[in-house]
Image (cartoon, coloured by chain):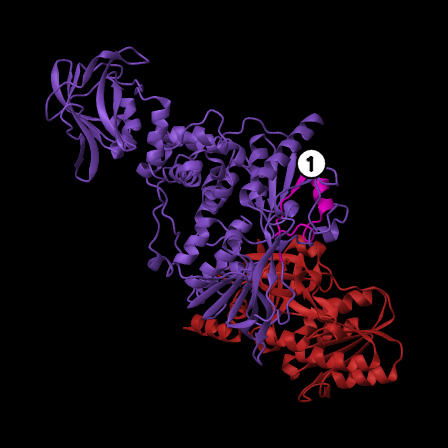
Amino acid sequence: MYQIIRKQLLAKGSIVRFDINAPRIAAKVKAGQFVIIRVNETGERIPLTVADKDAFSGTITIIFQVVGKSTALMRSLKEGDIIKDVVGPLGKPADAEKIGTVVMVGGGTGIAILHHVAKAFKEAGNHVIGILGAKDKDLLILTNEMSAICDEIVITTDDGSFGERGFVTQPLKKYLDERYDIKLVYAIGPIIMMKNVCSLTKKYNILTMVSLNPVMIDGTGMCGGCRVTVDNKTQFCCVDGPDFNGHLVDFDELEKRNSIYLKDEKDSLLASIR
Amino acid sequence: MFEDVKYLKFKSYLNTYCPHCRNTFNVEVKDRKYIQFKAIYQGDDIDLKLSPYLDVFDVESTKPITKDDLLDDLLCPRCKKSLIVPDKQCGECGSSVAEVTIAAFSRLLPFYMCMKHGCTWHGLTKADENKIKLKIPRQEMPEQDMKLRIANHGEVPYGYTTELAQLEAGRCLQCKEPKCVNGCPVNVDIPGFIKLVREDDIDGAAKRIKERNILPAICGRVCPQESQCEALCILGIKDRPVAVGNLERFVADFERKMDLVKVPAISTRLNRKIAVVGSGPSGLTVAADLIQLGYSVTIFEALHEAGGVLVYGIPEFRLPKTIVNFEIDFLKQMGVRVEMNTVIGRTIEMDELLQNFDAVFIGVGAGLPVFMNLPGETLGNVFSANEYLTRMNLMKAYKFPEYDTPKPRGNRVVVFGGGNVAMDSARTAIRTGSNEVMIVYRRSRQELPARHEEVRHAEEEGVKFMLLTNPVRYLGNDQGVLKGVECIRMQLGEPDSSGRRRPVPIEGSNFVIDCDIAVVAIGNTSNPILFQTASDIKRNKWGNVEVNPETNETSKENVYAGGDIVTGSATVIQAMGAGRIAANAIHKKLSKTQ
């Protein structure tokens, strides 16, 4: 029984936060790992990275943006409703060790995943610098939570409605220029953001980890739909990832693979409205 | 003699005649076939119709005949001459016998029938009897019309009718030392159950099969019989072998449809707990065997539906999911617990399982798809057969948008590989609106590893076979979506280690096949997910688990394994055989340490 314990609408309802009762997963899940959710009998299997957990009360937190039929359906669920299937934790956890100073770069809903990773790095005793970005003020999420975790934090919006105007790469470049003790950059967000962050950090030769979100069905290595090219080798995101060295990831290919079903998703959404 | 009606079933097809006037006894009344006689019973003239199909109770007589009673006389309805032969007696009960002539293997033979109701003596020599059996052709399976079936997902074969099944069962020679049994990985008593079919005890036949095989409805559909039991059938030397698979399927379907499945009462309950990882064929066998011995069994399944490859891999038109669900419900009724959405190695680790269970069986199958490592493999619309079939079967993408998982779109589909999975993918593509579907296989037709029936079905449905062809690279458009595959022609060279002739590419024979979808169905390897947190289970260089073949125990104590995770991609029935070995070994070991 995967019951929704708490539901919260973020970013004017375009982003939704669920706390789901899943004690077995909550006891096991580590930062960076994901779950697969199937809302009902006819639903598709949706991979969602766990944003937080509460092992004591046995809940996991997921945060997702409403983009298609399935996420719209999930938004329509209420507190107390049951989600048919939640399976996890899947994927390899983020390697959160004490290494010194780390920069956490998050964009859009990616901040939700980043939150869990940042927390793990903070708990491991690192100096955590947070850089969060979003389109505008309304789409920014978890700023308070992230401020509590990060030792330093910079917020950017594309239109300047909150924090600095511009993209996350600008403050990141400033940090990379000013500080020489940065050991690791973690970038989680839209593919284009992760790609730009990686091309920037490559110049400084700083290890950059990214969390990928390819099309996925079973999440246990069975279908091979989530294959990504890393270091010119094919990797399965669900068993080998989802976190990879961003300098080795072929982002263009990932972007193309992720856009194959756009037309179907639109059809599905339209069919559900009719 | 009326017991012999069953025997007469096939003789009616051979035609029966009056030895005096050559009148045929075969009649057809309202589309039903009978063998018709006049008889004298207890002083009365009666009409007697023996049905060539149904059992003794279907003898139509104008006066009921009590069992073990003798008929006074049997007459030809036309010439009214007695058919009784005075100088001959029944070889079993000594009663008088009647003679009819039967046409068999291009000659007329006298056929004697005992006049006692209940005696099965027939007077044919064993040699003649077997020759007659050879005369009955193998009964073809009734199938959905090929033009109709490509537009639906319904099962293709309809299954035998009782008549066909009994006719087919009549072909079995009932060998004293049956070879077919040795060909079966779980040694089903094949002649035994076929005999029961012939004797019209179909329920008994089902129970006989289930002594060895708990999933006959599934095995009858998906086993490669032609290379197992049927390959060893003696009839197969001169004629085509007995259709063991079709009969098995008939028996199991009959039992299920007639509601004859009984949940066995389990007398003892042991305080021993067994964990089964994976709900595919091997796991289900282990669960069924051990629950009946009184163990408490829990199956853990990573997906949201139980059945493993039976639900995500094999399509609806080959194995209806209602059958799989029926078998799993049956296990649940016996007391097996099934926990879905549980990934062993992630949700629960192996060592935690061992703390809570006395023994663990790993039957996770070969779940990781193999790709060919060709350029362009990550292009859009290049699928592993696993993904293609999982989308279509498990997620029911063929019902998109009613179900939310999108179905791969494409008019021209190319499938690589020649096994059952390749056939399944190709036939699924045909059914989901692809105009042109091709199977590209690097060897020739003889080497196709798929079941013959599947190859035939695929061909009938319009799948094109491009044999002796191998892909070289995938070609994509600027959106990163597949638009074609470059292939090369092959020729067969010297035999390799598997005994099959090795295909060798013909230089310069490259050509391009235009296509929208490519499905790679060249096999699977073992999934590493369980072993990432259980590295102490020894595996070989292919990633398969190493086991003691006697017990199927792994290098870790109390952990057993079987099925594709040990052997690599194999068949459903082999996985069940491995499950049985493990179940026996678990029981033996645990009862020692009681």
Q: Position of residue B419 (x, y in %)?
A: 53, 54
Residue B342 in the magenta stretch? The answer is yes
Q: Position of residue B305 (x, y in %)?
A: 53, 52
Q: Is residue A204 visible?
A: yes
Residue carrying label 1: B358
Q: Which chain is purple?
A: B
Task: Give the residue at x 40% y 28%.
Answer: B195
Q: Of all residues shown, which one is farthest toward the right?
A: A180
Question: Closest to the observer: B429 or B296?
Answer: B429
Please provide the residue range marked out in magenta. B341-369
Q: Quadrant of residue A154?
A: bottom right
Query: What's the amino acid at mark 1?
Result: Asp
Tell me which chain the residue with mark 1 is part of.
B
Q: Quadrant of residue B162?
A: top left
Task: Give the residue at x 66% y 28%.
Answer: B588
Display colour for chain A:
red
Q: Quadrant of residue A273?
A: bottom left
On screen, residue A235 versus residue B423, left or right, reads right
Quadrant (top left, top right, bottom left, bottom right) of the C terminus of chain B: top right
On screen, residue A63 versus residue B193, left or right, reads right
Residue A269, above or below B33? below
Task: Give the residue at x 35% y 44%.
Answer: B140
Residue A28 in the magenta stretch? The answer is no
On screen, residue B176 versus residue A199, left or right, reads left
Q: Is residue B403 visible?
A: no
Quadrant (top left, top right, bottom left, bottom right) of the N terminus of chain B: top left
Q: Position of residue B316 (x, y in %)?
A: 44, 53
Q: Position of residue B487 (x, y in %)?
A: 56, 68
